[in-house]
Image (cartoon, rainbow, N blue to C red):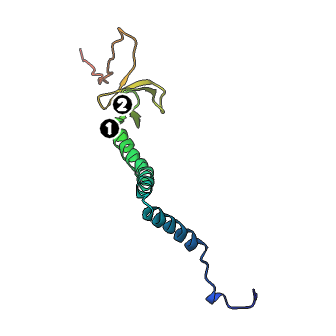
Amino acid sequence: MNQNSPKILQFNLSGFRSWLTILAVIWLLGMIGLGWLVKSFLLLVAFIVIAPVIALLGFRWWVKRNVVEDKCPVCSYEFKGFNRTQFSCPNCGESLKAENSHFCRLTPPGTIDVQAVEVKASVLED
């Protein structure tokens, strides 16, 4: 091959030849009565292509149903967690559980949770 020849007229047919060979084999199998083999192969390829798409859509639907976004009841830090699981708040470390799309503190049985309220002091004069 001449190294100085213009590359405009050169064609690369290596990829085209492989596709042409595959089409020729499929046509030949169809001609001799093995079309069922070609159809089952194409069905298998379609399943391999479609199955990951369906799995991805199913996973996204499951995540959308099970991810809870709420604030920590102790420090009011907003974050996400999975429904019906136990975890710790990433800000304060409090043990929490996600139930009914809200975060609840995990406390031992018999513990009473109270809210502190600030009361302004008033001076009584005698």
Place of residue 117 in the rendered image (x, y in percent of width and height, measured from the top left)? 30, 23
Q: Quadrant of the C terminus?
A: top left
Q: Residue furthest top?
A: 110
Residue topped by disc 2: 83
Q: Quadrant of the N terminus?
A: bottom right
Between 109 and 85, the one nearer to me in the picture: 85
Q: Position of residue 82 (x, y in %)?
A: 39, 33
Residue 85, image x, y percentages = 40, 26
Mark nearer the N terminus (1 vs 2) = 1
Residue at the (62%, 89%) spot, across then down: 9
Q: Quadrant of residue 6?
A: bottom right
Q: Which mark is residue 88?
A: none
The type of residue carrying mark 2 is Asn
Can residue 78 be seen in this snapshot? no
CB atoms at circles 1 and 2 under 8 Å apart?
A: yes
- The residue located at (45%, 24%) in the rendering is 94
Asked whether the viewer can see residue 31, the reply is yes
Q: Nearer the viewer, residue 61 or 120?
A: 61
